[in-house]
Image (cartoon, rainbow, N blue to C red):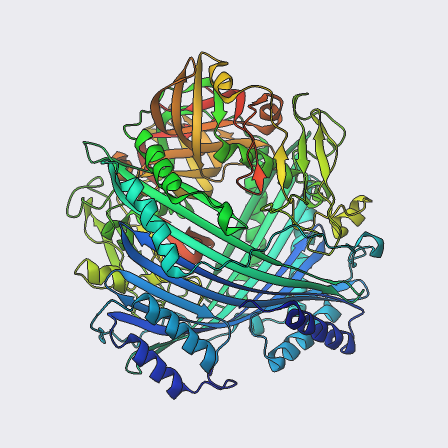
């Protein structure tokens, strides 16, 4: 645990006094303190390309009244600096009056342990493993032209001090191990990328030669793509594989169900609460409580314990994801979804681990039912226009389906659809739900936060595939 | 107030001296400070105010050909000392890399030209609010507009780049920006969103608020009631908002790192024709008040004007010290990328460009990350308009556009409407031979 008041002229009592004075006439707010350490070690082109260690410390003081948020942050934790921030907040909110909501649920739960993953594995052994990754991967075939492998680790301590002196703390480990490979055969180049991670030590993920599986998977994806032909263009049936392809749900549905867009009525979902937005078999939850998952949090960045929030149940829209501000304005409670990238950022309602739950069909049945379509197994990123509801995501491994059989691999293509209607096109939900490998970062309003996704295979009756073959 | 050069120089020199004392043979340090203030408005009401005060140091130590880096926002002397010790320890056990080195001394910037990148004007939050009120007033005059979100941001920055070779330079810069995102609704409750913005170094160069409000409203309303089109091969015009994206792809693909690592679709294409003969591309770092202007790159190397593409022929890569050594090229001051990158304007007017083909798809926005720099394949989601004989017929959405950059580059025709709104800029652009996927 970090003692934020150790090497500064600002005592905890001073801080509490400034917080209480500033937030006295506000509806909500807090002082958020953060101490984070992070590392990144990259092997590329057969060499250690970079090793970086970063240490970041700072605070953000927030006051909320009505719909207005006033925020001031600095990396100088001192009496002067905090006072300046307090003055800045008070001047923004000078004409507003609120009543501070002291209520905040507490938890004894903990979804990860207090480890510092950076220190748990020596630099020497990380460098050694990267060398092994390079040798192992290049030895697989003469067509391996480039190997990039990286460790990234983070240890973040946060402390939230609310008006009246209530203190909430959390310590969050996070790691990611990634391998990217480029192959070249007959003048054609293709890449494959795979990674794993979560909120445990590196070795939990890499032990028992697990790292070899990461290399193998990156190699496999690149090999498949070497034989790929141009992707088709137009509307067709799409079967999505289990796990990571659930970024479809994240983009198509997830963002549109975040509280802020719905309070502001700029989401295509804002007037659909209680209505059918998906086929009967579709249930989607956003869960912050899965142990050691990348998107999990013991408490969110406002101090609210996270939970498993049911967003869509058997096709009916049940809940939005809320932070405290949007919950208050929409007369509901926070779902523990208030998140921020760091002390430099304001709190927004965000996703944690977004999952479509199991149905009853097998993937084979789905593929068999398709005359002409594509089977998409692996994806790059995605993006959504909240207001129009249009979303995209990019395939990095996909195959054509012809007469119920998986055919040749096809080149990466973008798939585009309409969020509010896409889930009505889901005709079969699989029984093979899988979590993603722990690699997702979600971007919103310039803030990146770690998230997870999960789903079984699903059959979508109609989606536009953005290839070049007419 | 943003910290002055003396403070930043003192901090950087302290770090360099300490690292040398602890055993580094070479050191580089960058110290930067920025203060920014932002006010956001929504539907004529104050929504958010944000003040940011950010001081940061980055340091790289070398021991011979070994190298490691640290960065921190905690500038207490204790912490800096601990971090530099850690950095030295890490450097010692990191393997050697023959290409690790500081830049050649004769390439370092010696003269600093005043590019007029700093405006001392300060606009108070109350004045920002007045500006935003006017933006929203104008946008909300249109009855279709049901929501507006506007923001005004001012920031002042200062930095110092220092190295154990004696380089010690930096300068102040400022930025003022304002934006308006509008949402419009049609009779069936279907919504569309669009925006307008302005971003400049100097306060008085900003667009007038009524212009931002009216453009944002107009662009948003135009998008209402979109149609999905049939899948077809069609001529595509890229609006200036997105035509500049082609240059960003080019810049990534010709960076020395992509070339040296062999991961670029433009590898080995130097001195080859990759664009149509009419195409010239410049990277000009010394534009007065330019959004991408600079005197030197991330390593202190002097940044001179480069003609990257001359009559369609690729003439230069973007070279930094490390990958330059690997490719046997001298750094041309592009560590960290391009400065003010732009296409020389074309010879045909915007209006004539719209009429060149009988049917044209005019794209105003793309979504997704569909550029593959290894293969050159391109596939993204798009929205825009269908043009017939140069006339805007109806808005289009939920489609994708796809092609391969190798072909796309050769089929570009540019209008003569180049403007410098971003750091990377392109005129309106016609590309023939791409495929749009819809129904």
Q: Nearer the viewer, residue B372 or A126?
A: B372
Q: Nearer the viewer, residue A129 or A78?
A: A78
The answer to whether one can see residue A361 in this image is no
* Rendering quarter of residue A127: bottom right
Rendered view: A115 above or below A131 = below
Total labels drawn: 0
**A254 left or right of B99 in image:** left
Rendered view: B116 above or below A248 = below
Q: Residue furthest right?
A: B106
Q: Which residue is drawn at 38% across and 57% down?
A: B127
Rendered view: B426 above or below B124 = above
User: x, y (%) of residue B10?
Assistant: 69, 74
Q: Nearer the viewer, residue B270 or B277?
A: B277
Q: Which residue lies furthest to the left in this view?
A: A274
The answer to whether one can see residue A85 in this image is yes
User: x, y (%) of residue B355?
Assistant: 47, 14
User: x, y (%) of residue A255?
Assistant: 33, 48
Rendered view: A297 above or below B45 = below
Q: Nearer the viewer, residue B207 or A318?
A: B207
User: x, y (%) of residue A63?
Assistant: 32, 69
**A133 left or right of B151 in image:** right
Quarter of the image for the C terminus of chain A: give it: top left
**A304 left or right of A198 in image:** left
Quarter of the image for the N terminus of chain A: give it: bottom left
Q: Which residue is drawn at 46% across and 76% down?
A: A81
């Amino acid at each position: 645990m970090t003692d934020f008041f150790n090497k500064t002229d600002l005592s905890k009592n001073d801080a509490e006094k400034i917080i209480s004075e500033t937030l006295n006439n506000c509806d909500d707010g807090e002082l958020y303190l953060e101490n984070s350490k992070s590392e990144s070690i990259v092997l590329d082109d057969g060499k250690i390309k970079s090793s970086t260690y970063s240490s970041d410390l700072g605070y953000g003081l927030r006051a909320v009244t009505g719909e207005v948020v006033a925020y001031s942050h600095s990396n100088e934790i001192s009496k002067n600096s905090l006072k300046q921030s307090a003055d800045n907040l008070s001047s923004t909110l000078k004409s507003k009056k609120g009543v501070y909501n002291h209520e905040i649920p507490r938890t004894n739960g903990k979804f990860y342990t207090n480890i510092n993953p950076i220190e748990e594995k020596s630099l020497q052994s990380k460098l050694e493993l990267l060398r092994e990754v390079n040798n192992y991967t290049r030895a697989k075939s003469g067509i391996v032209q480039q190997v990039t492998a990286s460790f990234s680790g983070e240890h973040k301590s946060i402390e939230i001090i609310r008006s009246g002196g209530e203190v909430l703390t959390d310590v969050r480990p996070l790691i990611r191990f990634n391998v990217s490979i480029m192959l070249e055969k007959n003048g054609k180049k293709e890449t494959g990328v795979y990674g794993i991670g979560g909120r445990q030590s590196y070795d939990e993920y890499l032990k028992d030669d697990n790292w070899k599986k990461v290399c193998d998977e990156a190699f496999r994806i690149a090999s498949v793509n070497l034989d790929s032909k141009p992707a088709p263009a137009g509307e067709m049936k799409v079967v999505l594989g289990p796990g990571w392809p659930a970024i479809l749900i994240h983009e198509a549905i997830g963002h549109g169900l975040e509280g802020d867009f719905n309070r502001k009525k700029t989401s295509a979902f804002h007037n659909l609460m209680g209505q059918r937005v998906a086929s009967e078999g579709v249930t989607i939850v956003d869960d912050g409580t899965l142990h050691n998952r990348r998107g999990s949090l013991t408490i969110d960045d406002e101090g609210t314990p996270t939970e498993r929030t049911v967003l869509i149940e058997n096709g009916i829209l049940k809940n939005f994801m809320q932070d405290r501000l949007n919950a208050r304005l929409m007369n509901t409670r926070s779902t523990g979804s208030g998140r921020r990238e760091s002390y430099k950022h304001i709190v927004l309602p965000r996703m944690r681990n977004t999952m479509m739950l199991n149905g009853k069909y097998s993937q084979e049945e789905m593929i068999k039912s398709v005359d002409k379509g594509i089977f998409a197994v692996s994806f790059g990123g995605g993006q959504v226009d909240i207001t129009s509801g249009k979303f995209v995501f990019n395939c990095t491994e996909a195959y054509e389906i012809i007469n119920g059989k998986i055919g040749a691999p096809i080149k990466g293509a973008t798939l585009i659809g309409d969020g509010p209607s896409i889930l009505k096109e889901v005709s079969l939900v699989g029984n093979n739900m899988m979590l993603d490998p722990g690699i997702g970062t979600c971007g919103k309003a310039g803030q990146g936060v770690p998230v997870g996704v999960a789903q079984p295979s699903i059959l979508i009756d109609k989606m536009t595939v953005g290839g070049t073959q007419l | 107030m943003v910290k002055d050069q003396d403070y930043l120089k003192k901090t950087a020199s302290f770090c360099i001296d300490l690292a040398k004392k602890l055993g580094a043979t070479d050191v580089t340090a960058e110290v930067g400070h920025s203060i920014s203030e932002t006010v956001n408005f929504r539907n004529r009401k104050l929504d958010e105010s944000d003040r940011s005060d950010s001081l940061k140091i980055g340091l790289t130590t070398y021991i011979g050909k070994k190298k490691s880096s640290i960065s921190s926002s905690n500038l207490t002397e204790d912490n800096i000392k601990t971090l530099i010790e850690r950095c030295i320890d890490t450097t010692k056990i990191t393997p050697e890399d023959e290409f690790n080195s500081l830049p050649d001394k004769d390439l370092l910037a010696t003269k600093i030209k005043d590019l007029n990148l700093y405006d001392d004007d300060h606009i108070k939050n109350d004045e920002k609010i007045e500006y935003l009120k006017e933006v929203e007033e104008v946008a909300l005059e249109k009855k279709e507009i049901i929501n507006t979100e506007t923001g005004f941001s001012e920031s002042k920055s200062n930095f110092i780049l220092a190295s154990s070779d004696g380089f010690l330079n930096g300068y102040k810069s400022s930025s003022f920006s304002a934006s308006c995102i509008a949402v419009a609704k049609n009779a069936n409750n279907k919504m569309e969103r669009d925006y307008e913005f302005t971003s400049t170094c100097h306060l008085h160069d900003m667009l007038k608020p009524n212009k931002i409000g009216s453009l944002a409203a107009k662009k948003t309303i135009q998008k209402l009631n979109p149609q999905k089109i049939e899948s077809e091969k069609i001529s595509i015009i890229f609006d200036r908002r997105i035509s500049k994206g082609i240059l960003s792809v080019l810049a990534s693909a010709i960076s020395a790192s992509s070339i040296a690592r062999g991961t670029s679709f433009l590898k080995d294409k130097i001195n080859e024709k990759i664009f149509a003969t009419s195409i010239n591309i410049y990277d000009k770092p010394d534009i007065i008040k330019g959004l991408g202007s600079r005197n030197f790159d991330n390593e202190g190397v002097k940044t001179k004007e480069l003609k990257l593409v001359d009559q369609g022929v690729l003439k230069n890569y973007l070279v930094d010290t490390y990958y330059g050594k690997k490719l046997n090229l001298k750094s041309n001051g592009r560590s960290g990328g391009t400065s003010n990158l732009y296409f020389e304007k074309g010879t045909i007017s915007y209006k004539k460009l719209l009429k060149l083909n009988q049917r044209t798809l005019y794209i105003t926005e793309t979504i997704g990350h569909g550029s593959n720099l290894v293969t050159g394949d391109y596939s993204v989601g798009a929205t825009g308009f269908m043009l017939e004989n140069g006339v805007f017929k109806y808005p289009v959405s939920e489609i994708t556009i796809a092609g391969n950059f190798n072909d796309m580059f050769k089929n570009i025709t540019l209008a003569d409407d180049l403007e410098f709104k971003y750091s990377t800029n392109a005129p309106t652009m016609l590309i023939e031979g791409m495929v749009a996927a819809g129904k």
